[in-house]
Image (cartoon, rainbow, N blue to C red):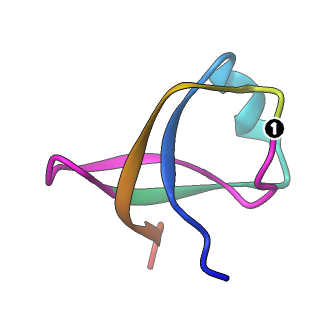
Amino acid sequence: MAKELKVVRLLEPELCLKCNFADVADVDTADGSTQRMIYCRRGDCDNWDTQSAEPAKRMRLFPE
């Protein structure tokens, strides 16, 4: 089963900077733009605000 990539807002982004599950990634968003974001390998986190989640097309870990 493939994972569906979503862009979510972080409640406290500074917490992710020291997290062992966080990586920096370049993310292609649904509107065609590319942004550098934090990618969470954990898959579920209390630091996410999923109310405004948006689809992402592709993710590349940085540096690739």
Q: Position of residue 44 (x, y in %)?
A: 80, 45
- Secondary structure type for disc 1: loop
Q: Residue at x 14, y 54 (%)?
A: 32
Tell me where the magenta segment starts and ends, as one range.
28-44
The answer to whether residue 12 is above or below residue 3 is above
Q: Residue at x 74, y 61 (%)?
A: 41
Q: Quadrant of residue 17?
A: top right
Q: Position of residue 11 (x, y in %)?
A: 66, 17
Q: Is residue 54 left or right of residue 46?
A: left
- Give the labeled residue for mark 1: 45
The answer to whether residue 60 is above or below residue 56 is below
Q: Quadrant of residue 58?
A: bottom left
Q: Does 36 lie within the magenta span?
A: yes
Q: Residues within 10 Å of mark 1 (few under 14, many from 20)?
A: few
Q: Does 4 lie within the magenta span?
A: no
Q: Residue at x 69, y 24 (%)?
A: 14
Q: Position of residue 26 (x, y in %)?
A: 38, 59
Q: Residue at x 76, y 26 (%)?
A: 47
The residue sitting at the front extreme is: 1
Kind of residue at disc 1: Cys
